[in-house]
Image: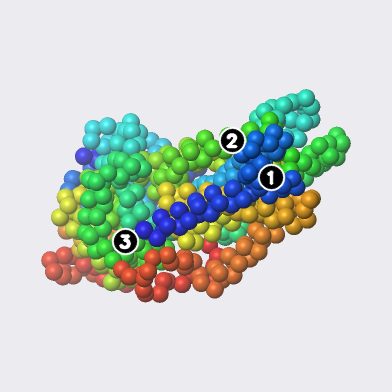
Amino acid sequence: MLKSKHITLGLFFMLAILSVVSLFVGVIDLNLRTLLQGDIEHLEIFLISRLPRLLAILCTGVGMSVAGLIMQQLCMNKFVSPSTGATISSAQFGILLALLFMPSSSLWGRALFAFAAAILGTWAFVYFIQKIQFKDVVMVPLVGIMFGNIIGGVTSYLAYKFEMTQALSSWLVGHFSLVIKGRYEIVYLVLPLVVLAFIFAGHFNIVGMGRDFSQNLGVNYNIVLFFGISIAAMITASVVVVVGSISYIGLIVPNVVAMFKGDNIKGTLLDTALFGGIFVLVCDMIGRVLIAPYELPIELIVGIVGSIIFVALLFYRLKNGRRSIRLKPSGSGCNTAPVMQGGQCE
Amino acid sequence: MLHIKNLTKRYSEKTVVDDVSFSIPKGKVISLIGPNGAGKSTVMGMISRLIAKDAGVVEFEGRDLSAWNSKELSKRLAILTQSNNIQMKLTVKELVTFGRFPYSGNHINEEDERIIQRAISYMELEEFQDRFIDELSGGQRQRAYIAMVIAQDTEYILLDEPTNNLDIYHATNMMKIVRRLCDELGKTVILVLHEINYAAFYSDYICAFVNGKIARFGTVEEVITKENLSEIYGVNFEIQTIAGKPLSIYY
């Protein structure tokens, strides 16, 4: 267990260092000295743009990966995530509804619509997969992707019909360039929701073991499922309202962490959150540096980096079955070769 | 005590469990047997609140099951089915720790820790305790689940086909464990079993179901007879007494 604590600490320091570096990456050259000398202009850039951006990035990374982890546990499927579970597209649909029916709505008004739509959309998806009980693990995310595309299709249709495509585009492709003080604070909602996830980590784990298993331990399966899915949907909606759609994080980050640390949420939640923050932060810096002084939207970078990691994950699974990467030195019965369970990827 | 009165379950028009009444003696091993579709698993599900009943009463310690607080009940009565998610990467110890959930939730104290370790060593799983359950063999995994139920520290343990998918060696070991749960730990164990001889050799009482009704209920010697079994299963039986137990041969 000693070594896994080291990993958490390592992730923490990495995130801290990257955060500081990220604050000083940008078009205008900020540095610590001018800031400390009290250069008003630089200080303003720092407080209005750089710091909010960093905080938004961290909330996005932490939130999306925790949301993904909760959804994967509750749906008992490693391929379910906000992007493959119709959550993101539902949130976008909610924003469109807000733009249509309440054109003058504030960010908070839109957030409310996004919340409601994301929760309803994800519930519908989860209800459906609970009813059907697919035997094949890949069917579940496929259904989610189809379901998400249907909602996305309706969104696009309505957007075209009411000439809203321009207004909506900002929420379709995730980017941090519009994150400035005063219009990103909704993303802070991620924090209390992640804390809730920490508190109920054990419940989510138990529900992830199945209905009979939960009932045996006196845990109400339906209520915890409902509650957990709602938390994941609300986290996603808070991110989508501010940043737009960012795929892959909720899918990849929990899977990578689980390969090292298993599925006990109490043990993995913190690492998942930290790694999520690092992942988005690094992607954001790449996007800012590549074609400076312009920047690439985060969705593009995450998409490319994410798909590469995803393919690597699939290849690892094909080669090694479901075996996890061992952290502890082999002893206490760990040195025997683990049972291979075919090339099936979860 | 566990009294079952007029228990009934219907799926659309088909009555799967039809007006079943019996009482489960405390501190014994009771096996529910019968052909496929006889309703034994459904009865087990209703006794353990996993399946909603359509009519009747399951009276547990003087109160109907539905009047029990779910958490309180999970300290008194445990059920293990075969429908758990075995893809989950949890270590044996993490799984056994869940057994303390009704008592301590997410915050395991020192006493819980002691109980968990005792359960693990009782099931001889010490060397596996940090292994992931999805990397264990079927027999080891089943023992890990039993260790969790032991940590749950209930008076009643219900097991739905615990020997399913196990080879003869592991299935026989599982039945010996069932016997020890009763004899050494004083638990009342209720099982659904397909293997008549396991039921006959390791149980105290047998309840045989046919078509949603109880065909026979009594001690092993009362139920396991040539006539009874031939009638219940509709095939020819011969009974031989081996090691003092009536074991059967069917053909």
Left or right relative to A165: residue A121: left
| Picture layout, residue B145 above or below residue A338 | above
Point 42% across, 65% down: residue: A327
Q: Secondary structure at mark 2?
A: helix
Label 2 sits on residue? A188
Label 3 sits on residue? B129
Q: Amino acid at mark 1?
A: Leu
Q: Secondary structure at mark 1?
A: loop
Q: Secondary structure at mark 3?
A: loop
State which quadrant residue A79 falls in.
bottom right
Left or right relative to A87: residue A261: left
| Picture layout, residue A227 above or below residue B42 | above
State which quadrant residue B250 falls in.
bottom left
Q: Nearer the viewer, residue B197 or A146?
A: A146
Distance Cα–Cα, label 1 vs label 2 = 25 Å
Image coordinates of residue B59 in percent, x first then y, are 27, 36
Crowd around label 3: few <14 · some 14–19 · many ≥20 (10 Å)? many
